Amino acid sequence: MSGSQGIPFAERKALLATRAELDRARVMLRMHEIRSIIVPATDDDRVAQLRPAAAMLVGLAGSFAGRARVVRWLRIASLALAAVRIARDWRGRSPRGEK
């Protein structure tokens, strides 16, 4: 470090610790950027990105088709999806719980 002769030892130590912490943060940021480029987004990330768009579409459908009709169709759709999940779960299991 240039010009460190006039700085007391405790201040130099604190400065070095701060610089090391900054370097660690920069490395972690670069690692996160590289990982986001290499590894595709997880399902949770996609859901977080699609949720506002879905809310907007439901709001638009509610304004065009009417709130009661949209609520009814969303209820039917959610029950249908639950039935599909139950059917997939049952199909995936072996008879009498045997493997």
Image (spheres, helix red, strand yellow):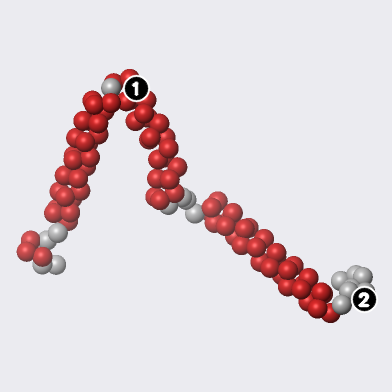
The extreme top residue here reads: 64
Q: Residue at x 16, y 44 (%)?
A: 83
Q: Position of residue 74 (x, y in %)?
A: 25, 34
Quarter occupied by the N terminus: bottom right
Horizontally, residue 21 falls left or right of residue 12, namely left
Q: Tell me the residue at 33%/20% (across/down).
A: 64
Please give left or right for residue 60 compared with residue 74 in the image: right
The amino acid type, in three-letter code, at marker 1 is Ser
Residue in view at x 87 percent, y 77 percent: 8
Residue 17 locus on image (x, y percent): 73, 73
| Cα separation between marks 2 and 1 | 71 Å
Kindly identify which numbered label has been placed on residue 5. Answer: 2
x, y percentage for residue 22?
Answer: 70, 64
Check disc 2 and report its element: helix, strand or loop: loop
Question: Which one is nearer the viewer's eye here, 31 or 81?
Answer: 81
In this view, the residue in front, 21 or 96, is 21
Residue at coordinates 39% horizontally, 50% vertically from top-left? 43
Whether residue 73 is situated above or below residue 8 in the rendered picture: above
- Of the numbered discs 2 and 1, the one sitting upstream in the chain is 2
Vertical comparison of 70 with 13: above or below: above
| 54 up-or-down from 41: above or below | above
Quarter of the figure with residue 68: top left
Q: Is residue 49 above or below residue 28?
A: above
Decide if residue 27 is in sight here: no
Per the image, the residue denoted by label 1 is 63
- Residue 82, image x, y percentages: 19, 45
* Nearer the observer, 45 or 65: 65
Residue 6 occupies quadrant: bottom right
Give, as a three-letter code, the residue at label 2. Answer: Gln
